[in-house]
Image (cartoon, helix red, strand yellow):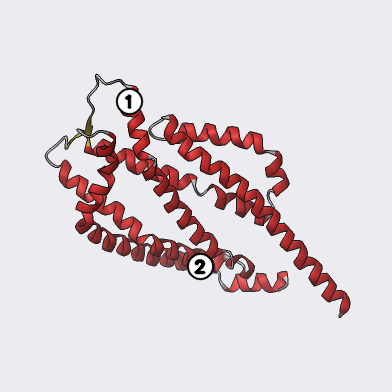
Amino acid sequence: MSDTTETKVADEGRMTLWEHIAELRSRLIKSIVAIVAGAVIGWFLYPWVFEVLTNPLHHAEKTAIIIAGSPIAPLLTRIKIAGYVGIIIAMPVLVWQLWRFVTPGLYPHEKRYAVPFTAGAVTFFLLGALVAYVSLLPTLEFLNAVGGSNIKPVYNIGDYLKLVVLMMIVFGAGFEFPILLVALEIAGVVTPRQLSQARRWAIVAIVTVSAVITPSSDPVSMLALAVPLYLFYELAIVFGWLYNRRKRKRAAKALANGSGS
């Protein structure tokens, strides 16, 4: 498809400012409805979700005491957990609404990457959240042990849930790193050779950022985040080589077909 044709297609998908606002409003309403519906389900799943979230704490400290802190803390805890579950359940809908809002402004050759990148972003975010949950037990064991056996930890449920949710968000956001690298490679902003040559600096940056953004500031969670990010960095380099190799083959084939016609 020529640039002129692509420009024409893109122009046809343009909307006025008020049409954009109306479209955004429609997408937001659908997203909010999906979150509320998911939160209702989360309200009834609360006992099971609460047990899952506090399971690492009970394994790290057999006699751990969890306090509410205030009379309304139990209600607020249930509302918060229901909201978190609602967002997770509604995530496919949220991503779909975002994709539908962005799609009209993309060229046809850009739209084909929208679905795989969106699906990849959701998958890697959930994978990061899972890694955060798995690393929670050794993290708590380290934090409990570092103060010595004379300290008896008592956990405020609000502070504990805040730590768990922050870890999941940070790990989930960090696991978007390979999606960003792949997007930059496809766009031609960086090359696999450049990433390979910058490997040492990348390792330093990954370790430094992981140490800074981990909520618990402990070496266990830092390594749990830094090691996968470095592996993703190497996989992005491999993907870049394979992508460019395939791109060169397509270009050579198109050139050969053009010469033979």
The amino acid beneath tag 2 is Thr
Along the line of sight, the residue nearer the viewer: 111 or 173: 173
Q: Compared with residue 10, is residue 35 higher up or lower down, i.e. above or below? A: above
Judged by depth in the image, the label closer to the viewer, 1 or 2, is 1
Location of mark 2 (residue): 16
Nearer-the-camera pick, 181 or 222: 222
Q: Quadrant of residue 149?
A: top left
Residue 33: x and y in percent read: 30, 64
Label 2 neighbour load within 10 Å: few <14, some 14-19, many 20+: few
Is disc 1 in contact with disc 2, using a CB cutoff of under 8 Å?
A: no
- Residue for point 63% across, 51% down: 184
Mark 1 residue type: Ala
Q: How many marks?
A: 2
| Residue 84, x across and y down, in percent | 30, 52
Q: State the image coordinates of residue 39 (x, y, percent, origin top left).
A: 26, 58
Q: Quadrant of the N terminus?
A: bottom right
SS type, badge 1? helix
Whether residue 80 is visible here, answered yes or no, is no
**Residue sitting at the far right:** 259
| Picture residue at 25% right of the left edge, 51% below the top | 49
Viewport quadrant of the C terminus:
bottom right
Furthest toward the bottom, the residue is 261
- Mark 1 vs mark 2: which is more N-terminal? 2
Q: Which residue is mark 1?
A: 145
